[in-house]
Amino acid sequence: MAGDVVPRDRARHGCPLALFYDDVHRTNGRLAGILGAALHRELLEPSASGYDRFVRGEVQWSLGMRVEGGEIGMGGIGGSSGWYAAGPDYAMSYVTRGLADHSRADAVADAVESALSA
């Protein structure tokens, strides 16, 4: 991806997770090659939707990831998360050792999207 915030050769911390989400949406990506075209399409499309008692809200899930408003990803307990955002075309991961909500990851994502739109 042009303009990577973290160079691809720095595979530590959250970088492999961001690289996964950078690849997950690509029809010619590594994951698509492993899964095949039909299963890859299913991976990107909602397969279940409704009220999620853990998230405490309406959600759409693909085959293991949350799909929402042009984004596909997964948030974890403690504030870590990773996703691909189609609109601004970027992948990001935020990995923390602490237990918190997602407000810090949201702030970083807002800053990234602001920088990408400048």
Image (spheres, grey):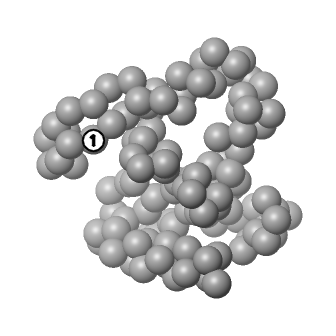
Expressed as whole percent of the image width and height from the top left, the position of residue 44 reads: 54, 32
Mark 1 is on which residue type?
A: Val
Front residue (pair 35, 44): 44
Residue 11 visible in the shown view? yes
- Indicate the quadrant containing the N terminus: top left, top right, bottom left or bottom right: bottom right
Q: Which is more toward the observer, 84 or 17?
A: 84
Q: Residue furthest right?
A: 9
Which residue is disc 1 drawn over? Answer: 59
Q: Residue 10: horizontal and vertical position, in percent?
A: 79, 67
Left or right of 3? Residue 63 is left
Residue 35 horizontal side relative to residue 68, left or right: right
Residue at 65%, 40% (x, y): give it: 25
Residue 39 in the image: above or below residue 76: above
**Residue 114 percent coordinates (x, y):** 55, 81
- Look at the numbered disc 1 and give the secondary structure of its residue: strand
Which residue corresponds to the image point at 64% horizontal and 84% vertical from the top-left?
118
